[in-house]
Image (cartoon, coloured by chain):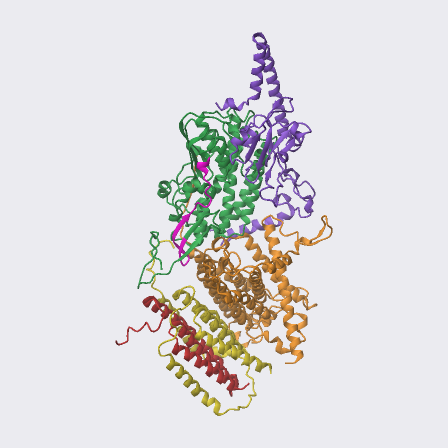
Chain colours: A yellow, B red, C purple, D orange, E green
Amino acid sequence: MSEQIAFWILSAIAVLGALVAVRKRNLIHGVFALMIFFAALSGLFLLLLAEFIAAVQILVYIGAVGILLLFAIMLTERVAGDDGRRMTSRGWFWGLVVAAAVFVVLLLPAIQQWPTPEVTQAPDPSVEELGHKLMNPYVMTLEVLALLLTAALIGAVTAAQGMRKPKEEGSPE
Amino acid sequence: MTLHHYLILAALLFCIGLMGAFTRRNAIVVLFSVEIMLNAANLNLIAFWRYGDNPALQHGPLFTLFAIAVAAAEVAVGLALVIAVYRHFRSVDLEVMDTLKEE
Amino acid sequence: MSLLGGGIFKGMAVTLRNFVGSYFYKDRLTTNDYSWRPSDKLPQHAGEYPKEEGEQLRDTTTVTNYSRNFPMLLHDGSEPMDTIRCVACQICERECPPQCIYIEKSTEKKENAGGKPQFYPAKFDIDVSVCMSCQICVEVCPFDAIVMNSQFELSTPDRFGGLLLRRDDLLKSNDYYHNIHPEEAAARDKRIAEEKAAKEAKKKAAAEAARKKAEEKAKADAEASEGTPDIQEDAE
Amino acid sequence: MSLELIRDILVATVPLLLIFPTLFAFTTWLERKALARIQNRIGPNKVGVPLTRYGGRFSLFGLGQPMADGIKMLFKENIVPRDADRLFHLLAPILALIPAMLVLCFLPIDFPWINNIQDSVKAFMLDGAVIFFFAITGLNTLAVFMAGWASRNKYSLLGGMRAIAQMVSYEIPLVLSAVIVVMMVGSLNAAEIANAQAGWNWFIFTPWGLAAFIIFFIAALAETNRSPFDLPEAESEIIAGYFTEYSGFKFALFFLGEYIAMFAISGLAVTLFLGGGAGPGVAALPWLSVIWFLVKIFALIAVMIWLRGTLPRLRVDQLMGFAWKFLLPLSILNIFIAGSALHLLAGGRLAGLDEKQPILRQLMEGANPLVVAGLWIGALLILYVAANGLNQLSRAKVRPREYKYAE
Amino acid sequence: MSSATAIAPNYELIQQDGLETSLLEVSMGPHHPSTHGVFRMDVKLDGETVVDLQPVFGYLHRNHEKLAENMSYLGSMPFTDRLDYFNSMTNNWAYALAAEKLVEIEVPERADYLRVIMAELTRLVNHVSLVGFFINDLGALGTPLLYAFREREKILDLFEQASGARMMCNYFRFGGLRNDVPEGWLDRARDVVDHFPVFLDEYEQLLCENEIILSRTQGVGCLSRDLAISAGITGPMLRASGVNYDIRKVDKYSIYDRFQFRVPYTDGNVGDCYDRFMVRMLEMRESIRILKQALDGIGDGPVLGNAPKVFKPKPAEVYGRVEAPKGELGFYLIADGTPKPYRYRVRPPSLINLTVLRDMCLGQKVADAVIILGSIDIVLGEVDR
């Protein structure tokens, strides 16, 4: 029972957060709505017994991605973050239609088997198991991910840099 | 709670993201939307793991973990691109960036 | 090479020493704990500070011979206006740097403490919201009529009227002056006595010399020199 | 939802909500008093219950001061700048408080009353408590940014930017030094980590644990914006940083959030390095562990106050340099040292160990004292040399100077 | 989007792809916790870096010079207290020196000794509280400042006993001092002077080796020797930039030639905030040396010569200057034969030392701008007059 209440509340927050994030004119408000969405999703993960993923969700999405977005907005827009121009693109109507169509398409397989049986077995939420899995069969993936993150880091730095000439030797900061 | 609840929620979130990506002109909002879509997919993965046949294998969390890591990299690079574009066009409006378009 | 972070640890040792020391050595403290004092017993004059248990004895915020706050007018006897020293010569009014003194001379003369008829201030106002306690008026006064008071608790809800001290507020007896600035007052009285004696001697000599010439004229001269302050000789 | 569940939730949470704000009030008093004494002042000593009209007051060293402050804060005018984002201006202090309060749940404080409540309420004793802790303390950054941005004040914005940069940077050494403990215990569960240090097996009594503790403590200072890392609220530079435009109770909430965060991060340090509730007499009287836990937290807070009374603050570039060029390499090196020591000790025995027990302790049992001493000296020497080298590298080049005297 | 027009030589904002970072204009002051009075700096920031800085002052302008021209010579003596309100004694002295030159008044020996004692005590007060403020600007939570104020308090108590006021002493008169010091004052002064080095040792232990202070101050706000000379900088700031110039040594005014003391200065390599801080710390030790000698050498006698209170000097021009704690404080008087000066001009060290603020701050961080301002040691009463 409590699980259901939690699910409905969390999913309402998630949907609202996502909608506000997408529709809000003020970008900073949008980022914070996006973070609420992330937080609600993290709650849903907890509800699904994936507590480690929930923690990672908060850590990465709110702690890192959100902050990064805030910084990007600070760097691009003016401090206010208010994007005063026309906010929707020219083909917005067709975009809406396509999105709705995709929703229907995605929904169809789910509706087909409508009342599904309740699931019986609960997974083991232990983080330890996850860690072992990461170390044993998926160690290669982990390494590749590390490489990818490093590459992304370097790429991001080089893409965003170039504002200043490299400083001459010995010149004070 | 059943799997379908989560699947429908994920589909809804995904479509909200899609709608944002289609309808907004601001590059950063498009980035938001992509994130929302990725998260919806993650929710699906976890839900399938939770209600699937063999949760002990931990496939769902592992996959999500990798997806989150990749998404983080994507945001970093994406934002760097937005900043680079902003520097060039002095705008993050996607409709301004049409230099490759044939006139 | 010094220890990494050694300077920080040294500084922390100093603060620790001060922390502990403040409990044991009262002279480390800068402030007095007067919180036990009921509000109606708070000091009114500079001299009323501490010297009770729990307060620092080293604190030197006591009355000194030279502590000054706002000026006051001296009188010698019991009835202020009969023995006021001020003759309304208005030198202080002229010299006051912030010009906070306002004097109106009386129209007729009245006998002062010495028994001589003198002008007196019909009005003598000091705006203490302007006064900056510089003591210049005291220094230029040729009659030792104005000196510094040490009362400082003058706060009032009336900003203009309350801070404008009238002649009668300003009049204080010489005994009071002796009470608040004993050393300074004694020195001043001694000097006045000396000057008086010298003047009397001079007067006597002058009178004797004059008697040889013409009695009336000499008398008039002596009176004139008494009535004119010394300062005017300097100002030449 | 049954009544029992609600009761159990209340039993589990309400005491936390009462104890820590009370301790916060006490800590503000303690800080003011200690700072005053460091500065050779007396500090708050007046607030109390007057006994008679003329003097005589039951003041008890001014312990009533926090209450007076609280009342004052409550009745102050709430000023919002005209151009401020009113919603965010209101939300920021609340958001600053929530994560700080939330992470308190992860601390393994064995309150006697939570032993007989349902397991589902103890869910906060999560398997990944440590990682959750870091995740949620990271949210504080957002509140700070919100406050800085919503105030529409340049100083606030500068403070908010500084806060974000600082918190994001120092989170890394913070987590990396916690990793050492996780490595040694083999668990992310706070309670398990605390249990692994029962008796005197505190992790601070290992060379890498000691180094990690120092790094952790320094990073924790930066995370909680304490001196010498109080740049986001640097008074002499940017007025009060992100809460320049806050007044009254909102300001008090920020203050509360900051102190609760101090408790939380000190509590984590106690859990990770100082043995949790371990201490003399715990075996006989289990409730003593709560006392010990709080005593250790207050010991750390006392050091924070002491540092605040002594040190000036760093500059913003030095602050970032310190995190990235000094603490980060050191903590990585520390992990390497701990790992290689583990392998050095283990040799071939690694496979035969019981996974449910702290790995390192099993290895250290029965080790030669000479080896242990060698490990201590070796590890600390390497770390010290590395620290010195890093210090030399990152220090600004300054030409030598000489003071002469002219007769 | 404002562009940085004037940028320090060591700081270059390279414009590439037409991008310039938008600058943040911050008006620091006149009510800012660390602006040392009602001083305002209009700072343009690129992130945290200062790209432009415009000092704005005048909030405390009180028409000091014109007031003095409408007042007798004695009347402006109390107003000189208000110039540099930390060091009223040296302000008085500089003015008294100028006026004494004008009317050629001799000062009794005891008065000269007392003047030296007061001036050096003032120097201790100024330097010790400056160091406290400076460290406070660095971000220490008032601890060094309060230690400094405890010592300052002892000296202010001495001032109060002698002159009746703690800060606005108004103690010097043309031809000597207003009154003699009270009985036992010299012993108390000796006591204070003897204990001061103990405090200085503790202070140095607290501050001089602290790594944070070193890294914050070294290499920050460098003032080159040439710039210091050509900008007319005086006082400890000039000596920190490596110029050996002290008016006590150059003019040997009053009886300074009787004392053995040294003037600390640097080799002029750096001239940064740390040098300015250290030069002041070292100067305090020398002041204590002077004080000890003066307290031992003082004899009995009158403290005020037979000087008139109000006078009409012959038409003349004089310039009297002393080494105030902040630098050269000079008074330039033109007399036209009336009891009031025709022209009365103050050469305030604070204002002239402040002129190089912009040169020192450009390219530094905003936090550095604060401590550079702190290390200049200004008092707005003197800057704005």
Which residues lie in the magenta part?
A: E43-67
Image quadrant where one finds the N terminus of chain D = bottom right
* Residue E123 visible, this orientation: yes
> Which quadrant of the view contains residue E350?
top left
Q: Nearer the viewer, residue C137 or E352?
A: C137
Residue B23 vertical position relative to residue D385 in the rendered view, above or below: below
Numbered disc total: 0
Residue drawn where x is 47% and y is 76% of the image? A18
Give the left or right position of residue E4, taking residue A67 as reference: left
Whether residue D21 sits left or right of residue E116 in the image: it is right
| Position of residue D113 measured from the top left corner of the image (x, y, whole percent) | 68, 72
Q: Quadrant of residue D391?
A: bottom left
**Going by the picture, which residue comes out furthest to the front?**
C107
Where is residue D36? Give x, y as percent.
60, 51
- E136 or D368, which is in the foreground? E136
Residue C180's spot in the image, x, y percent? 65, 33
Residue at position x 46%, y 83% in the image: B11
